[in-house]
Image (cartoon, rainbow, N blue to C red):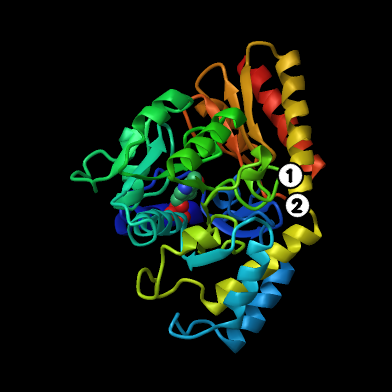
Amino acid sequence: MSAFDDIKARDEQLICNTYGRYPLAIDRAQGCHLWDVDGKRHLDLVAGIAVCSLGHSRPELLEVINRQYAKLVHVSNLFYQREQAELAEKLLGTSHAGKVFFCNSGAEANEAAIKLARRYMRTVQGRDAYEILTLSGSFHGRTLATVTATGQEKFRQHFEPLPGGFTTVPKGDLDAMRAAMSPQTAAVLVEIIQGEGGVLPLDGDYVRGIQALCRERGVLFMVDEVQTGMCRTGRFWAHQHHGLTPDVFTVAKPLAGGLPMGAMLATDEAARGFAPGAHATTFGGGALVCAVASKVVDIMLAENLAEHAALMGAHARELFAGIARRTPGTIAEVRGMGLMLAVELTRPAADVWRALLDRGFICNLTHETSLRLVPPLVITREDLDSFAAALEDILRAQG
Ligand SMILES: *Cc1c(COP(=O)(O)O)cnc(C)c1O
């Protein structure tokens, strides 16, 4: 039995069957590469689902983890911790927000945003507004509230009864958004690029229109940057592409370099919705993850990874445009911003995805016909060139 077959057999016997896994068991990772348990090297164009933005096994993060683990890991939010204050300063310094709440995942960050919106309306505005409007095709997480916020039926099926006070509004239709708003509306929550929905960017005028509508009606405008945040799209925050100033936005995937962490950032005004005891988490904002996240922000700014993501994204698009020219009828479209990209094929992508895997290139098969690429932001031109060459070869061979 190979090392892979052995792990797979034990996994299938012992672990809840919730994941459709790739036929690989990963043993170690370095930079933009993964090594499987049978010793084969792969180029990682998934980065743990847009998580490992700095690449794997960064020596600077290892150094912080070693130092901070020896000093202080967790004492809970009963105490003040220097590491939280330092990270808050750095993170808030990248945006217009004034306050942050630390938690442990994207779903938790969105839960915090939802709770803040409702509590802000009741305790600050004195209005019984609780309704959260989200968009069709969106994805906001897997807890009961965030799965209800998620505008895709398949994630909610069989989990009813769902929490009340959520409405899905058709995406791209500002009149529908206007019509959906009522005196009970507390907030609108949107992604700038719908990630799990298939890497679908929202139109700039449309999202600016939603923000304007929110301001006009006294509704909080909230952006889910769990996947798009922290340099991924070519700006530190994706909402900055469109000149938006959300009252609340959330982040998680790239925040702590692969360690689990989420955060909700809010303007000082919106943050008035929380008071001592209103919301909490045992693990959130522990000294270890905060110290690592601080280093992540430092490196992103020092290495200007937003600009690098924009440049590499543009390079990848040129490569794909070249393939589309030379092998007409294979690539239908390329979507996304920066290093959050989808290559939409003209037919089911599973065979192409599998052939790439066999050649040592790992990308993400999201929807039936599209390949999603969310590589480490430190990926090089040469890595992208090698991926594009393999993709072209495969598209030609599969004609
Ligand atoms: C991944 C994701 C989430 C959920 O994050 P978890 O850490 O898995 O809870 C929420 N929103 C968006 C946009 C995401 O991409």
* Front-most of residues 215 and 296: 215
Tell me how far mark 1 sits from mark 2, CA to CA.
Answer: 6 Å
Which quadrant of the view contains residue 109?
Answer: bottom left
What's the residue at 76%, 27% (across, down)? 319
Residue 286 placement, left or right of 141? right
* Front-most of residues 240 and 369: 240
Depicted 48 relative to depicted 179: above or below = below
Label 1, secondary structure: give it.
Answer: helix
What's the residue at 67%, 73% (across, down)? 62
Q: Quadrant of the C terminus?
A: top right
Q: Residue furthest top?
A: 328
On residue 305, the disc is 2
* Front-most of residues 369 and 165: 165
Coordinates of residue 198 in the picture (x, y in percent): 51, 32
| Viewer can see residue 354 | no
| Viewer can see residue 291 | yes
Coordinates of residue 284 in the picture (x, y in percent): 46, 71
Depicted 115 relative to depicted 331: above or below = below
* Front-most of residues 238 and 371: 238
| Within-10-Å neighbours for mark 2: few <14, some 14–19, many 20+ | many
Marks 1,2: beta carbons within 8 A: yes
**Label 2, ligand 1: CB separation under 8 Å:** no
Label 2, secondary structure: give it.
Answer: helix
Q: Residue furthest left?
A: 161
Kind of residue indicated by mark 1: Ala
What's the residue at 58%, 27% (across, down)? 352
* Residue occupied by mark 1: 309
Kind of residue indicated by mark 2: Leu
What's the residue at 77%, 21% (across, down)? 322
| Within-10-Å neighbours for mark 1: few <14, some 14–19, many 20+ | many
